[in-house]
Image (cartoon, rainbow, N blue to C red):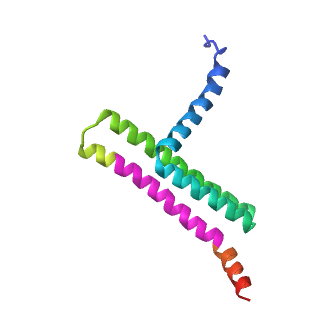
Amino acid sequence: MPKNTAAGPKRFWKSFWYAAQGIRQAFRTEQNMRVHTGFAVLVLLLAALFRVPPGDWMLLLLAITLVLAAELLNTAIESVVDLVSPEIHPLAKAAKDTAAGAVFLTAAFAVIAGIYVFYHPVIDWIAAFMS
């Protein structure tokens, strides 16, 4: 027999509220989340300034999303590790370091994507400035 779905839509919309609270919490408490967000805003402003093509916008948005999502997952993992292992433990360190490594990899990808997207527009801007 199907479950009562009357609470389903309410529960569904409430899940967005909880997700927003998680992002807000990470932004308030994690310096790296604020730094990554600041760079994301800067990159998007530069993309608008240089009028990058739509495909390049998608690459930038993908890179930004991956970095911010990895930072959120890193924050969640660190919180859980701190909860279950408040004392220093090699496995706790391994979990935290591995999660931080995921952020590093996505940030490295974002830098490479940024170089790919901005290389020619910046070179063209410099050439126009020099002439």
One can see residue 80 in this view: yes
Pick the front one: 3 or 79? 79
- Residue 46 in the image: x percent, y percent? 68, 65
Q: Is residue 103 magenta?
A: yes
Total tally of numbered discs in the picture: 0
| Image coords of residue 31 (percent x, y) | 47, 50
Nearest the eye: 76 or 91:
76
Q: Residue at x 61, y 70 (%)?
A: 116
Q: In this image, 53 relative to 106: left or right?
A: right
Quarter of the image with the C terminus is bottom right
Left/right of residue 119 with respect to residue 109 in the rendered view:
right
Residue 123, position in %: x, y? Answer: 66, 80
On the question of residue 56 being in view, the answer is no
Asked if the magenta segment contains residue 7, the reply would be no
Predominant secondary structure, magenta span = helix
Q: Residue at x 24, y 46 (%)?
A: 90
23 versus 50 height, above or below:
above
Give the residue displayed 53% in from the left and 50% down from the top: 34
Q: Can you tell which quarter of the image residue 79 is in?
A: top left
Q: Which stretch did the figure color magenta? A: 96-118
Q: Residue at 59%, 36% (x, y): give it.
A: 20
> Where, quadrant-wise, is the N terminus in this rendering?
top right
Using the image as rendered, state which of residue 84 and residue 39 is in the foreground. Answer: 39
Percent x, y of residue 127:
70, 84
